[in-house]
Amino acid sequence: MRLLRTTVPTLILAATALAGAVEVGAKSAAVFDAATGRMLWGKDPDTPRYPASTTKILTGLLVAERCQPDEVIVAPPDTETVTGSSMHLRPGERVTARHLLAAILLRSANDGCHAAAVHLAGSDAAFAQVMNERARQIGCTGSHFNNPHGLNDKNHTSTARDLGRIACEAMRNEWFAETVRQRKWLLERSANQEDLWLFNKNKLLAADPTVDGVKTGYTTEAGHCFVGSATRGGVRVVTVVLDSPDWKKDTRNLLEWAFRTHGQRTVVRKGAPAPPAPVQGGAERAVATVVAESLRLLVPLGSRPELRATMVPTALRAPIRRGQVVATVRFEDGRGWSGEVPLVAAADVPEATLAQRVARRPLVLAAACGVPLAWVYVRRKASRSRRRSYGRRRW
């Protein structure tokens, strides 16, 4: 794709030819290009469903984003009232965020989620507000989280599309990604020394060495759910199955389809020239720009990505330094995905000198020159008039 006019309208790549290529029994399913969060295929991806413990992907992401690994989290007094899967926290027990995150993501510890929620927001309800806000930032439009763990709640729902977006975002966090690929974990904790080993509930980690995440989920109402990740040849794919009769089989089918039928294509390369960005108050009216980072997409083999690209300038005022971010390019595929690539200045642009500023405003220049000339003309005319009047009086 050549870069770039300010707006580049093109035909959008259709995926309908591939829509029936995947066999899954799940009621909702989706496959994503993890690097960009772009959905490659979906089956009923926007119907709200109970997410069960796949909720913990978002909870874990917030822990990874808002805590330091060695930050101490204290189990709240009501910790033993939390039902379901548990790390058997005791009230007042102290655990670092590193180990609490492992318990949340590997053992699916509901009491660990409650402890994290109270630590970060004061209560489960307040933490749910934080979850919903973060989900909106990621681009989720069909979710409403009402608790940190996914225990069934009629007001706690998400979609395959949203869970995939959340997982793509979470797998970009190195701490989160390193944790979910662990098959077992030895806890360090201040109490309950009888319960130290965690074993990951994601059984695909042992069955497929390319699988590297992320989270299982099950309740009677939600059925079997799984959000997965696998990396092959440096390319990561995220999968989602909700209410599946066989989550492992469905996930394998999604992964094999994605890697068999798709390849990575470069949309734009780092360093490629881009349109100039306007600059106010500079020695030049605009600054040359280049692409700051490459953008690659997974697309069906043999095809080229056809996207709408729009340059989004920012309000720039001189001086501008080479390498400074001065604009972005937004790419859209017409099916709900968009991604942005920053543009940076290719050269310095100093502030305009006084002479340059005046030269760019001819009316101002004319006015600036005309006022003193007019003043001289008026003074001379007045002087001549006074001399004539004086002469007449003497005569």
Image (tube, rainbow, N blue to C red):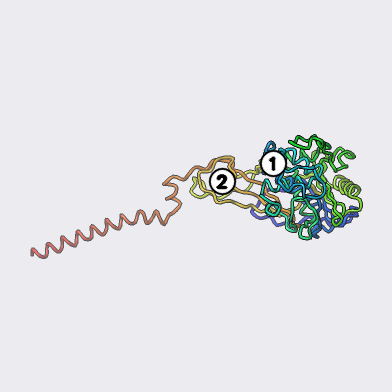
Disc 2 marks which amino acid?
Answer: Val
Residue 272 location in percent, x, y?
Answer: 67, 43
Looking at the rendered structure, the secondary structure element under dot 1 is strand
- Report the mark closest to the observer, 2 or 1: 1
Residue 134 can be seen, yes or no: no
What residue does disc 1 label?
Answer: 73
What residue does disc 2 label?
Answer: 287
Residue 102 location in percent, x, y?
Answer: 77, 40
The dot on residue 7 is: none
Disc 1 marks which amino acid?
Answer: Ile
* Nearest to the observer: residue 137 or residue 263: 137
Q: Is residue 345 left or right of residue 18?
A: left
Q: Quadrant of residue 176?
A: top right
Give the residue drawn at x 88%, y 39%: 208
Q: CA distance from mark 2 to mark 1?
A: 50 Å
Residue 224 can be seen, yes or no: yes
Residue 233 location in percent, x, y?
Answer: 82, 38
Q: Earlier in the sequence, mark 2 or mark 1?
A: 1
Give the residue drawn at x 61%, y 43%: 344
Looking at the rendered structure, the secondary structure element under dot 2 is strand
